[in-house]
């Protein structure tokens, strides 16, 4: 039920209460937050879990408010889970893979069990590639905010950091700086044609490589791995800036691409066919704006706009200054499509008709303009606000925040919104979704103290084009 008048400080009190109500305890310690406090029975059972990606924004609130213990416990618990996994399923070596979520279960006989889902329980059995990257990014954030240098130095942590870097940097069957992943391996955890080299994973990989190479002890045996991580990070950054970037001059180039070029000098090395440029894009892309495309691979450029990848690219310093400005200009020029009535549109445009059939496998939750397929997600608000502040566009940050504040509490913090402009509460959205709550709280703090934006972003914003 909508509640009357919610001014900002009331909202902050309510949001904080929800956050604390959602805390999960294990062995007497706070270790995470559940995904949703919705009690009307609509929620899937795993919304009682603590999701690694969801907890990141809750962790930011805890860090900002000085309640750092829960973040530390969460990071330690994942080290423990990582350690258990190799024995659980008989791996002979540590894998780096972190679960999508975990839960603490009471079996009714006084025994408390910790259970982690590595995608083996999730709908569609999707692999949570982003979890290990988020864990590392959050570890870096924890170290930076608290100044605690001892945690990451512990042997368990060093093993995990090394295992994650090993996992991401191991020899593969292809020779691109990007990481090849299956469909649904990140926030979009269902089929949506995001297999291959989705932007979001690449951007998180960049930040994780940076954090990992900084936190791994620079002792003799580890130096090759650290150097490799640095080399890959730089290559990845240049590759994203150059080949994922799309603005009108680049679209013109692609429009006139020759195809089927052999050899080292080809301009169109991935053999992108100009005919694959979608109709909607040509008139939609403003003269003075740009963005990173959703995915890139052999003969495949996915021209959709995904907010997560673009916003994190600004926060983590992958987007250089001109690109940052261009992305924020795109938001301003296409506000109705990308923000609409509720920040922030997750992907634009929606897959419709045959594309929806083929790329989602007729997923009824991902129908056009709903959920991951063109739905609007309050969980992305904090990244939008952070990116806009870092890019010098506090006007956009405030505008988006005002929109969200107008509705979120009244509508009980929905998980997502439906419709081209996100005007409807998502048909199957949970209420009291925790990352909608914590994302709003982070945005609230950022706007009160914009200096926090640089602290929470793992890399400095302004970096030269030549030297990422
Ligand atoms: C949905 C989302 C996923 C999120 C989870 C918990 O599965 O797709 O990104 O982590 O809900 O909120």
Image (spheres, grey):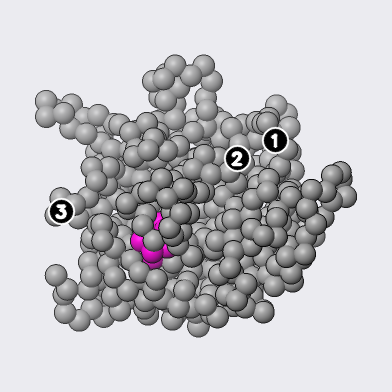
How much space separates mark 1 and mark 2, taking CA atoms? 9 Å
Residue 136 can be seen, yes or no: no
Q: Residue at x 88, y 50 (%)?
A: 265
Q: Position of residue 165 (x, y in %)?
A: 61, 36
Residue 17 appears left or right of 251: left
Which secondary structure lies at badge 1?
Answer: loop
Query: Would you say the beta carbon of the disc 2 residue lies within 8 angstroms of ligand 1?
Result: no
Whether 468 is drawn above or below 52: the answer is below
Residue identifier under label 3: 39
Residue at the spot of label 2: 180
The crowding category of the residue bearing disc 1, from other C-alpha atoms within 10 Å (few below 14, some 14 to 19, many at least 20), is: few
Residue 6 shows in the view: yes
**Residue 334 point in image, percent of width and height:** 52, 77
Q: Nearer the viewer, mark 3 or mark 2?
A: 2
Numbered range of the magenta stretch: 369-377
Residue drawn where x is 70% and y is 53% of the image: 272
Task: Work out which residue is located at the far left of the displayed protein and give it.
Answer: 109
């Amino acid at each position: 039920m909508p509640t009357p008048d919610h001014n900002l400080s009331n909202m902050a009190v309510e949001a904080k209460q929800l956050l604390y109500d959602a805390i999960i305890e294990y062995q007497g310690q706070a270790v995470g937050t559940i995904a949703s406090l919705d009690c009307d029975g609509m929620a899937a059972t795993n919304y009682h879990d603590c999701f690694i990606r969801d907890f990141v924004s809750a962790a930011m609130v805890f860090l900002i408010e000085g309640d750092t213990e829960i973040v530390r416990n969460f990071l330690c618990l994942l080290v423990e889970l990582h350690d258990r996994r190799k024995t659980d399923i008989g791996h002979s070596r540590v894998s780096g893979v972190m679960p999508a979520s975990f839960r603490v279960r009471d079996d009714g006989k006084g025994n408390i069990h910790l259970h982690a889902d590595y995608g083996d329980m999730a709908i569609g059995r999707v692999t949570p590639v982003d979890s290990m990257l988020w864990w590392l990014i959050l570890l870096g954030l924890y170290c930076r905010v608290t100044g605690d240098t001892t945690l990451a130095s512990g042997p368990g942590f060093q093993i995990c950091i090394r295992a994650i870097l090993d996992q991401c940097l191991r020899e593969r069957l292809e020779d691109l700086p990007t990481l090849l992943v299956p469909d649904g391996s990140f926030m979009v955890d269902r089929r949506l044609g995001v297999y291959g080299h989705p932007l979001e994973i690449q951007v998180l990989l960049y930040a994780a490589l940076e954090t990992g190479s900084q936190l791994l002890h620079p002792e003799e045996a580890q130096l090759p791995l650290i150097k490799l991580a640095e080399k890959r990070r730089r290559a990845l950054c240049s590759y994203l800036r150059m080949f994922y970037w799309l603005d009108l001059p680049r679209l013109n180039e692609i429009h006139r691409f020759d195809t089927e070029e052999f050899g080292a000098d080809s301009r169109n090395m991935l053999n992108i066919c100009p005919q694959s440029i979608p109709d909607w894009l040509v008139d939609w892309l403003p003269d003075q704006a740009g963005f990173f495309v959703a995915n890139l691979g052999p003969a495949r450029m996915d021209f959709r706009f995904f907010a997560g990848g673009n916003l994190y690219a600004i926060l983590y310093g992958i987007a250089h200054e001109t690109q940052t400005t261009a992305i924020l200009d795109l938001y301003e020029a296409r506000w109705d499509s990308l923000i609409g009535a509720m920040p922030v549109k997750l992907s634009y445009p929606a897959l419709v008709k045959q594309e929806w059939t083929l790329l989602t496998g007729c997923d009824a939750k991902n129908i056009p303009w709903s959920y991951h397929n063109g739905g609007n997600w309050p969980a992305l608000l904090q990244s939008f606000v952070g990116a806009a502040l870092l890019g010098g566009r506090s006007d956009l940050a405030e505008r988006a925040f005002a929109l969200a504040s107008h509705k979120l509490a009244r509508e009980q913090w929905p998980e997502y919104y439906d419709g081209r402009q996100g005007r409807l509460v998502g048909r199957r959205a949970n209420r009291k979704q925790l990352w909608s709550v914590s994302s709003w709280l982070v945005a609230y703090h950022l706007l009160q103290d914009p200096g926090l934006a640089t602290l929470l972003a793992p890399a400095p914003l302004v970096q030269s084009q030549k030297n990422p």
